[in-house]
Amino acid sequence: MSFKNISRAFFLCLALNSILMSCNSRNKEQDQTQKENTEHEVPDSITSCETGLPQRFSGNPDSSSASIPQGEVSHEGMVWIPAGEFYMGASDDEGRQDEYPSHKVRVNGFWMDETEVTNAQFRKFTEETGYITTAEKAPLWEDIKQQLPPGTPKPHDSVFVAASLVFTPPAHPVPLNNASQWWSWMKGADWKHPEGPESSIEGKDNYPVVHISWDDANAYARWAGKRLPTEAEWEFASRGGLKDNKYPWGNEDIEAGNPKANTWQGTFPNKNTDWDAYLLAAPVKSFSPNGYGLYDMAGNVWEWCSDWYHNDYYQQLQDKTTDNPKGPETSYDPMEPTVPKKVIRGGSFLCNASYCKGYRVTSRMKSSPDTGMQHTGFRCVSSGK
């Protein structure tokens, strides 16, 4: 699928209040239909991670990743994940509907970055290639108006600025059914300014790079001679050799014992107790690795996978063993049927048991390939010895 065909219509939910109201109403109706038609009904507190989330309104739909030459891979800073067979997807009652049914998968051995890609690593990439990330590009009306409903008015020129989505917590508790209450479209936010134009990454070389779109992650992977992991590879690696456990470390609850990952403790989204010592992102390797030696496979930042997202993809794989699945050929998300999306995995520093619990090894989320956010990064893999 060409990225030229990806719709950017949904950022108008921020620019035009009437469209925002329409989008929220549509999402509620689709969520209700989704619940009624699935065996695995889940509460609103679990499905709310993306409800009302402002979508990226991209500038140039042509990704510059195509101009990035394929680099020579180095396995320094990577760990070898041995080939294996496992049951992919949720086997308990905590999953969302798209995590079922659990199905058998075999994956070949592969190399995986032991940490999320850091600011220092991404800086080296941009310095050598001159690459400009999606968040640093201003949207162009000519590029997007053809994908909007006929007669949609052009937003004010103030909308057409380089920007990204920044976590802006409210000062008081809010219902967890509309993520736009704690996400803001902020001019000047990008990987070098993760909390907005006045912020910086000075002294944060070993923090995970964020505000990264799928296009940006794919471009970096090409430059590094690597690729993005398939969703199956990601989940297999996340499990760390454990069988049917909820988390990369086992089954112990996230807040039992010592801190095991960078997540949200307290009342989301207005109060974080910082029990794990971090309010937002943490430096890589701040917590113990899983059984394969991989860090932050739960929490810290969401990580892009190569797969397109389709809500019923797992149903297509049930009752059989699939070798090295690479995801569906097309994307479909009933919450936003017109927006193709890629899978993201692992949860982030915003995940809380009352909200999304994205740090479970089977938890799946999705986002449009041109969307960058303050809690989204990536890591790479490489095939073969």
Image (tube, helix red, strand yellow):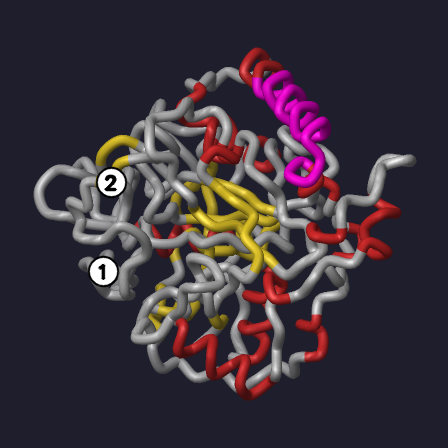
Residue 381 sits above or below residue 159 on the image: below
Q: Residue at x 85, y 37 (%)?
A: 152
- Disc 1 target residue: 289
The label on residue 37 is none
Note whether residue 289 is visible: yes
Residue 328's place in the image compared with 109, above or below, is above
Q: Type of residue at label 2?
A: Asn
Distance CA(mark 2)–CA(mark 1) = 24 Å
Mark on residue 272?
2
Viewer-nearest residue: 109 or 375: 375
Q: Give the quarter of the figure containing the C terminus.
A: bottom left
Identify the residue at image location x=60%, y=32%.
312
Residue 12 percent location from the top left of the image: 71, 40
Residue 323: x and y in percent read 53, 52
Horizontally, residue 87 falls left or right of residue 158, namely: left
Identify the magenta region: 13-31
Task: State whether residue 233 appears in this view.
Answer: no
Q: For residue 171, what is the image quadrant?
A: top left
Q: Is 160 on the left-hand or right-hand side of 308?
A: right
